[in-house]
Image: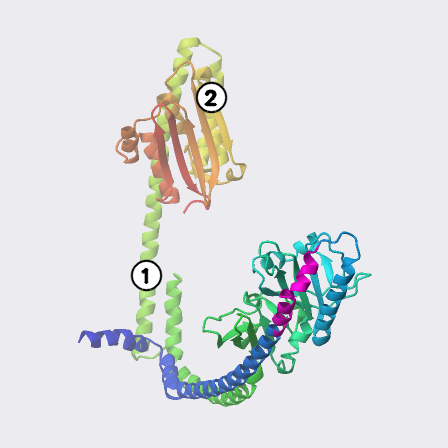
Amino acid sequence: MPRLSWYHHRWLDPFLNLSVRGKLFILFLLVSILPLLFFVYYTYVSVKDQLVQQTYSSMSLATSQIGSNLQNKLNNYTKISASLYLDATLQQYLVRSYDGSSDYLEAYRYIDNVMNNVLTTNPEVSSIAIYSTNPHMPLDDTFIKRLDDAIREKPWFDRVQKTYGNVIFTITPAKPEALPRKATPPMFTLVRFLNYNSLNFPYGILTIDVKESDLYALMGKEDQNKDIFIVNENGVIVSSKNKELLNTRLGELLPDDFKQGRTGKYESVYQGNKVLVVYDTIPNGWKTVSVVPYSGFMHSAMRSANRILLIASASMALCVVLVYLVARLFTKRIESLLKSIRRLEREDFDLEMIPMGHDEIGQMSFALHKMGHRFKNLINEVYKKEIAKQEAEMNTLQAQINPHFLYNTLASISALAMRHRDPKIQDMVSHLAKFYRISLNQGKNLISLSEELKLTRYYLSIQQIRYENLIHLHYQVDESVLVHHTAKLTLQPFVENCIHHAVWDDERGMNIIIRAHRDGDDICLDVVDDGMGMTRERLASIRAGESVGYGISNVDKRIKLAFGDRYGVSFYSRLGIGTTVRIRLPASGPI
């Protein structure tokens, strides 16, 4: 029973909740379109798999043959280098110290004879050179050259020193013409450290250059409609149709996936096209990689699939039109009813009454229009009551703070008059008049931050006359926030608390910093003093709202009423260090 309920909830309910047109479309898909699409897909996949398998078989055979030929080439070059590496007479001539006599002529006759024999019997070899470490060895700059700093800076120099006499292969890029040197094509270079019978005292480096084009000739006949690369054990291209790709990592051009073994295939993307990659690995770790675009061998499969899809699309289009016309006859009234519901969602309760008959849909339409009219009356009634309530609360809270402040100000003026009979009283009265001119603000509850800061300055001017040099003011105001609004008399109660409760040294006085700045999408007003501060218990009590003064609670309530519950007043204080009051306001204005 629970399983049947789950099935009903998981599959049947969504279907029943669809529109009539949706149900007709789903049935059409199940009966005709889905089988047709499955047939097209199955045909395409079957043909594709056959073509991929045929292509893979032919490419595997060709790649394996290229790899075999490549291995033979590399073995031949290795044997040539071995014959020179193991030549004891050549070694003696290379390490001998020549004192200026004609002994070197015998050495050169032997070296020229050996080198020319190699070039004659191996016409694909372009050049041979030995870079000698013997400072007494005369140079001919043809076969014998100096192992100087230019050679030590070659990218293969450090590698060949660690091979203990084994060979390495590298690619030398093409060099443009620079007189007297002629332009040279890319070279495939064998490099070998000459240290036969003297591992700790090498006597030179042997290089054998072969034109890269001779190496690529191994696969030149197989590169029709595909790209073939020879890469070394590090994945660097050493031979390719495109010579600009030499010495480039194949992984930068073609995401490699050679984890299947020494041979294999995988799909990838090359130059924006989906390709089939077939590779074969020779014993030294080099790979022959063939890349064939799918578009090359999938053309016939795609052409057949496109024809089938065209016929299927025409059939489906015709069926969709017929289903749409039939479904439209049933769903037109439902759409009209849905439009009325959406107007109610947008709080538009003035619905147009459209005759829909007396069946179930017509009865629903009549009930919906009646309900919309009722909603309109109820919402207007509740909205007006809520606005009137908030206005009354705002006006009451705003009116309560003015007598409180007036009492403190008049007490200050009276005390000063009795004590000094000083004309400074005129200044206090002037500041007080300016204060009230802004605070009254024609009965408005919100004022700009610019006006709020003016109110605070007038109040502090009055207090500075009374307390003279005890109060030191500092303003840090971001001018861009002055256009935003806050509740009236937001800062004054906290400045008043600083003056009356935070001063603890009548000689040193106290610093008060007033900041106004942005914090993300909010505006923050800070009142900071370096007075006596508060104990942790006192601060916790204030934050819990248990012992908050009238002025503080008044400001916090007015801000929450005007801007929302996430805004208001927060406190930070440490005994003997000072107190910071932060008032957070939205930059977007009141709710």
Badge 1 element? helix
Q: Provide residue 545's location: percent of width, then percent of height.
A: 28, 35
Q: Provide residue 541's location: percent of width, then percent of height.
A: 27, 32
Pick the residue in front: 484 or 499.
499
- Give the amino acid type for the residue marked by disc 2 in the picture: His
- Give the amino acid type for the residue marked by disc 1 in the picture: Phe
Q: Provide residue 11's location: percent of width, then percent of height.
A: 29, 76
The picture quadrant where one finds residue 228 is bottom right
Q: Which mark is residue 472?
A: 2
* Residue bearing the label numbered 1: 375
How packed is label 1: few (under 14 Cα within 10 Å), some, or many (20 or more)? some
Residue reaching furthest top?
420
Q: Earlier in the sequence, mark 2 or mark 1?
A: 1
150 in the magenta segment: no
The picture quadrant where one finds residue 299 is bottom right
How packed is label 2: few (under 14 Cα within 10 Å), some, or many (20 or more)? some
Give the spatial CA distance, label 2 vs label 1: 59 Å
From which residue to which does the magenta span run? Answer: 76-96
Res 500 visible: yes
Number of callouts: 2
